[in-house]
Image (spheres, grey):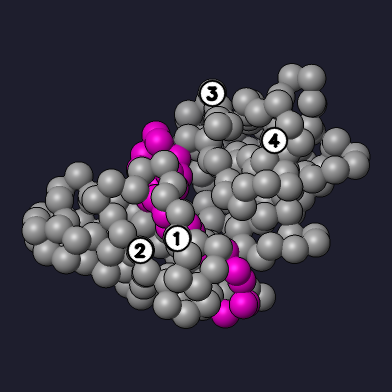
Amino acid sequence: AQSVSQHNHHVILSEAASLELGCNYSYGGTVNLFWYVQYPGQHLQLLLKYFSGDPLVKGIKGFEAEFIKSKFSFNLRKPSVQWSDTAEYFCAVNAAGSARQLTFGSGTQLTVLP
Amino acid sequence: DVKVTQSSRYLVKRTGEKVFLECVQDMDHENMFWYRQDPGLGLRLIYFSYDVKMKEKGDIPEGYSVSREKKERFSLILESASTNQTSMYLCASSFTGGGSFNEQFFGPGTRLTVL
């Protein structure tokens, strides 16, 4: 069974700082990868996804993620965070072509100080 | 836009009560999922369904059951609620087919407190 690790549980940054949130998964086959975000009081929504092709994926609100197959990683980045990026971020993996379910990481709470 | 709705945002029940959480999606998705979300544990899959009347256990099915009588509706049932089932419950749905890559769409969640 696959698993997903998000090593940063809580990250605190000042506005304009750069962000990188780590995500590693354990699954040897082809995967679909996702980053979801949950803003305070709101439902989970998709930030970006990777399924094939260019390993650098761009999402909404200036976020991007890079799939590095050799490292089983899919780290989320943003060059300059804003206060409105304060939220919880979840990485998820799906074993492409087989299971319908996603496996989620434990989440990273990002707090951006104004 | 895909819409996934859940019957309640907040629910307070007593230990031993039978609890029903309802979820409805309006995009004709085949797959529906129930998760619980707890601080530091992320989302854990309770049950999912890939067709009407079909169900599959997820990672933590103990103490829960589900029902899917119609394609758009997926219910989570706590037969006898216990305090350790106090949590946020999230429903999601997804489409199986070309281009979906199993992306899931989430409802707003139900925060259940069991006293």
Label 2 to label 4, Cα distance in Å?
34 Å
Mark 1 or 2, nearer chain start: 1
Label 2 to label 3, Cα distance in Å?
33 Å
- In this view of the protein, which residue sits in the foreground, B33 or A19? B33
- Label 4's element? strand
Label 1 to label 4, Cα distance in Å?
33 Å
Label 3 crowding class (10 Å Cα cut-off): few <14, some 14-19, many 20+? some
B104 over A20 or under it: above or below: below
- Label 3's element? loop
Residue drawn at point x = 54 percent, y = 68 percent: B51
Mark 4 or 3, nearer chain start: 3
Label 1 to label 2, Cα distance in Å?
7 Å
Residue drawn at point x = 44 percent, y = 47 percent: B58
Q: Kindly indicate the quadrant of the structure image that contains residue B34.
A: bottom left
Mark 2 belongs to chain: B
Which residue is label 3 attached to? Answer: A7
Which residue is label 1 attached to? Answer: B55
Which residue is label 4 attached to? Answer: A76
Frontmost of labels 3 and 1 is: 1
Region rendered in magenta = B26-48
Frontmost of labels 2 and 4 is: 2
Q: In the rendering, at what x and y percent does residue A78 appear?
A: 73, 38
Q: In the rendering, at what x and y percent does residue B11 appear?
A: 23, 66
